[in-house]
Image: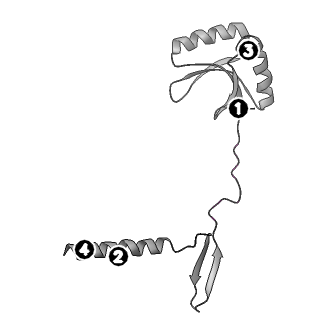
Amino acid sequence: MKNVYYTILFLTAFSISIVMTSCCADNECAEEDIYGKTIVRQTDTLYNKVPKFERGPYSVQIGAFANKSYADAFLRDAKSELRMDVSMKQTSDGLYRILIGEYKTVTEAEEVLQSVRKKGFNDSFTRDSYGPINK
């Protein structure tokens, strides 16, 4: 009885694999129509248009802290030293980012980045909500 069960199981699995792999490897599927002719059609699962990935607004990150009291102290010192629009934003994972401004273009943010680095914030970089901007 076990042999019959295993035989049926094997044949079922084999039949399913044949059905699932009915398309050819070169992305062309073959079908037979009601007149016995073979119809070949091209299948494509890729997007013809690449979705647009828009970035921005851009900011300059001058620090990031896991401890809120350290972030508050750094923010206070940065505001007094830089005299710019310095703000703090908390991320979903609990990190406190110290950021300067919100700019529409990378060029504007890069100009601010250069002036911030001249004032001693050498680890600063340009970023947006997706992450750092590598230029």
Q: What is the crowding at mark 4: few (fewer than 14 residues within 10 Å), some, or many (at least 20)? A: few
For badge 3, the amino acid type reads Met
Look at the image and say whether residue 46 sits in the magenta stretch. yes
Residue occupying the point 61% across, 85% down: 38
Residue at the disc numbered 1: 133
Q: Earlier in the sequence, mark 1 or mark 2?
A: 2
Check disc 4 and give the amino acid type. Answer: Tyr
In this figure, which residue is indicated by the disc labeled 4? 5
Of 16 and 133, the residue lying toward us: 16
Q: Are marks 1 and 4 in contact (CB under 8 Å)?
A: no
Q: How far apart are marks 3 and 1 (CA)?
A: 21 Å
Sooner in the amino-acid sequence: mark 3 or mark 2: 2
Q: Which of label 3 and label 1 is nearer to you?
A: 1
Q: Which of the image's four quarters has the N terminus?
A: bottom left
Question: Residue, x 64% and y 60% (percent of image)?
Answer: 46
**Cβ–Cβ below 8 Å for labels 3 and 2?**
no
In the rendered view, would you say 55 is above or below 22? above
The image quadrant where one finds the C terminus is top right
Q: Which region shows up in magenta? A: 44-55
Q: Given the image, on which type of amino acid does mark 2 rest? A: Leu
Q: Residue at x 50, y 28 (%)?
A: 93
Q: State the CA–CA distance, disc 1 to disc 4.
A: 60 Å
Q: List the residue tagged with mark 3.
A: 84
Main secondary structure type of the part rendered in magenta: loop
Query: Alpha carbon of mark 1 to alpha carbon of mark 2: how far?
Result: 55 Å
Where residue 72 sits, quadrant-wise, is top right
Closest to the observer, 124 or 108: 124
- Closer to viewer: mark 1 or mark 4: 4
- Label 3 or label 2, whichever lies nearer to me, is 2
Task: Report the colour scheme.
Answer: one colour
Mark positioned earlier in the residue sequence (3 or 4): 4
